[in-house]
Structure formats: C-alpha cells, structure tokens
Image (cartoon, helix red, strand yellow):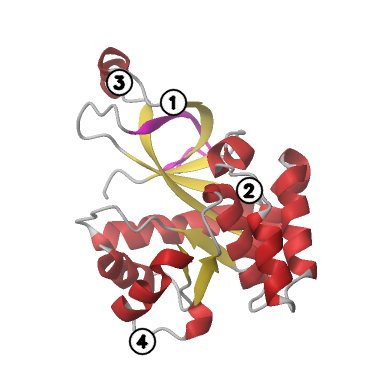
Amino acid sequence: MLQSTYDRARQVADHIYIVTEAGHADELRKQLPELPDDAFIVEPARRGTANCIVMALEHISRRHDKDEPVAFIAADHQVRDASGFVRSFTIAGAVAKERNRITLIGIEPTYIATGFGYIEEGDPIRLDSIVREVKGFKEKPDFAVARKFVESGQYLWNCAYFVGTVNIFMKEMKQHSKKLLKTFEKLEKLKDNKDAYAKAYLSLETAMIEYELIESERPACRAGDL
C-alpha cells in the first residue's frame, strides 16, 4: 500500500516526502530505495498527526517555496481510480491557493461505514464548482446515524487528506492553534542541532490534527470518483 500510494503521489507532485516514526524508517527506506535520505521525515517517537504534520511542514519550508501546495496523503487507503485521485488533488491544490485556506478531499460514501468520520457539505464555493464549504464535522457515528448521513447525500467520508501551502498552514496555526505554531517555531530554531531537535520533539504532548487545526470551516473538494 505504501508503494501504491507513492506511485499515485508521483502523478501529483514532483517532490515526495515520507513521514514516519523511527521504528519504521529503515523498512520504509528499503521499500522505496529510489528516494534520497532527505525525503524521509522521521519522528523520534509518535506524537500524533498534528505534530508530525508540523514537523513535515518545517522540513519542507527549508527546501521549497512556502507558497507551493503541499498534500498530506495517507498510505493506508486502497484507491482504484488513480486518475480521479490525481484530478481531485490537482483541484484541491488550486482551490487552496485561490482561497488561501486548507482544503480537504472528502470521499463520497459507497456504503454505511461507522469507521470513518464524516464531513457535512455546505454550499458550493461558486455555482459551477464541485468544491463546497464545510458545514461541519461528525465523529465516527453508530450504524443508525451513519445510515442517515449516507442516505442524505450531504456527507463525505473524512479520510484525512489535507492540502495547503506552508504559508496557509502557518496562517491557520496563528488563527486556530498557537500550540502548533509554537511547535513549528521551536523546531525551526533547532533545525541545526539534531539532538536538541529530537529532545524538543519528544517533549511534545500527543495531538491530532483534526482537533488541533482542521475542524474549523474550510472548503472540501468532493472526490466522488475515487
């Protein structure tokens, strides 16, 4: 699944980074030997999706234009329609830059699932657009509630696909999560001191990106063809 995710990502981006925890890093390097060592962003230990995303943004900010779109793509999803996947992320990158906001890619439900969170769709950002505002987020529901979500046609699966530039993520952190902003600034200061960088990261409290940053109103790209 890692290799198939990498193959899809190569169709979207010129530069790919793998974010992983130290215990998996060597195995992942073996799985993707074509990537240079610098492409692996390694957590000293797990501290949740919020912190590893901040670590990745700090790493990328030193190597690329901060106004270049960055997509966070989970490696544990099976996607049959690779062209639909590429199209959705291309649209999401353009929308993120146009609206100066983090953009989510939601997947149109194909069955009543209780293992996913849901995104409630709002109004389209313009009349001819498949991209909609986020009306709300719903936690993993029980079966009866999930059935209502799916039957309404107004909900997408939230699969934790986030797109935005480094500057957009920084803007959102300033507005919605001073804690993550402080983490970014701390790691940025310690970038040349490997031991201090690792020690600072290990001192962080575990935090999830949905709760820390994402669950405020933002566009969602409807990816019903994935």
Q: Which residues are magenta?
A: 116-131
Mark-to-mark CA distance, 4 and 1: 38 Å
Q: Earlier in the sequence, mark 1 or mark 2?
A: 2
Q: Residue 203 in the image: x percent, y percent?
A: 68, 53
Q: Secondary structure at mark 1?
A: loop
Amino acid bearing label 2? Arg
> On the image, numbered disc 3 is attached to which residue?
146
Q: Earlier in the sequence, mark 2 or mark 3?
A: 2
Query: Label for residue 139?
Result: 1
Q: Earlier in the sequence, mark 3 or mark 1?
A: 1
- Comparing 209 with 220, the one in front is 209
The answer to whether mark 4 and mark 1 are in CB contact below 8 A is: no
Amino acid bearing label 1? Glu
Mark-to-mark CA distance, 3 and 1: 10 Å
The answer to whether mark 4 and mark 3 are in CB contact below 8 A is: no
- Comparing 144 with 39, the one in front is 39
Q: Is residue 67 visible?
A: no
Mark 2 or 3: the one toward you = 3
Residue 116 placement: quadrant:
top left
- Any magenta on residue 161? no
Mark 4 or 3: the one toward you = 4
Does residue 221 appear left or right of residue 152 in this picture? right
> On the image, numbered disc 2 is attached to which residue?
101
Q: Is residue 196 visible?
A: yes
Residue 2 placement: quadrant:
bottom left
